[in-house]
Image: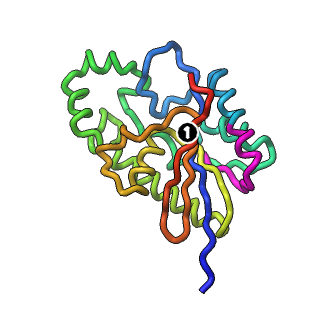
């Protein structure tokens, strides 16, 4: 029997976004563009993928991902937004500094740390919900891609960690142990089941 060819989907985290200062935020669905550093990271990604036979780029519709995808594509590769690749919704915590949340909502902050998979910020979603929709998006992308082809998926740290937890059969409670620096690349291989390769780090970290 002929062995089924592998389809490769390179899972990419977007470049560094244009934050107002150096603090850490619950960014979620807040739609920020890339910073100059993020543009440089996306340009490095463009050079990396210029050596690969990429036929399509799928991305979160948020600006930091669509910009990264368009730079990678360089008007050569078609880019397609996929709504379910959007970052986890942080609700009323959107664009709040993490230190502010820790001080103003100490009980909820502790609860999130203790129940990271199922905790929902007010009007937001949990990582369980984020994983369900992002896995469905990944399966749809695999169905769209011809067998043996190569594509790129540009998404967010939360989404990427959810996908990698699912593929590796790792408890979602451990998702924050999965490194996802800006511009990193993780090859996902589909041949009837999903496997994740070793991540490739962008050398241009902020």
Residue in view at x 48 percent, y 67 percent: 193
State the residue in front, 46 or 135.
46
Task: Establish if 118 lies above or below 144.
Answer: above
Q: Position of residue 69 (x, y in %)?
A: 67, 41
Quadrant of residue 24 in the image?
Answer: top left
Q: Which stretch is magenta?
A: 45-60
Position of 172 compared to 148: left or right? left
Q: How many marks?
A: 1
Q: Position of residue 171 (x, y in %)?
A: 30, 51
Residue in view at x 57 percent, y 52 percent: 187
Position of 165 compared to 72: left or right? left
Residue that badge 1 annotates = 13
Q: Position of residue 140 (x, y in %)?
A: 54, 62
Residue reaching furthest to the right: 76
24 falls in the magenta region:
no
Position of 153 compared to 126: left or right? right
53 falls in the magenta region:
yes
> What is the secondary structure assignment of the residue under circle 1?
strand
Q: Position of residue 97 (x, y in %)?
A: 39, 19
Q: Can residue 14 be seen by looking at this rendering?
A: no
Callout 1 crowding tier (Cα within 10 Å): few <14, some 14–19, many ≥20: many
Position of 54 compared to 156: left or right? right
Task: Establish if 36 lies above or below 171.
Answer: above
Task: Establish if 153 lies above or below 68.
Answer: below
State the residue in front, 199 or 129.
199
Q: Can residue 53 be seen by looking at this rendering?
A: yes
Residue reaching furthest to the left: 107
């Amino acid at each position: 029997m002929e062995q089924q060819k592998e389809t490769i989907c390179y899972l990419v985290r977007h470049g560094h976004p244009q934050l107002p200062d150096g603090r850490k935020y619950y960014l979620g669905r807040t739609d920020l563009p890339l910073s100059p550093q993020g543009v440089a990271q996306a340009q490095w990604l463009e050079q990396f993928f210029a050596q690969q036979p990429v036929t399509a780029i799928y991305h979160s519709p948020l600006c930091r991902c669509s910009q990264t995808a368009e730079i990678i594509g360089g008007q050569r590769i078609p880019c397609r937004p996929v709504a379910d690749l959007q970052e986890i919704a942080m609700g009323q915590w959107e664009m709040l500094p993490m230190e502010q949340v820790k001080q103003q909502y100490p009980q909820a902050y502790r609860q999130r740390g203790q129940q990271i998979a199922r905790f929902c910020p007010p009007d937001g979603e949990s990582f369980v919900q984020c994983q369900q929709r992002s896995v469905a998006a990944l399966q749809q992308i695999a169905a769209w891609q011809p067998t043996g082809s190569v594509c790129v998926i540009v998404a967010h740290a939360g989404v990427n960690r959810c996908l990698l937890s699912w593929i590796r059969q790792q408890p979602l409670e451990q998702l924050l142990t999965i490194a996802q620096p800006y511009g990193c690349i993780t090859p996902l291989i589909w041949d009837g089941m999903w496997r994740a390769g070793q991540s490739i780090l962008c050398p241009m970290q902020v």
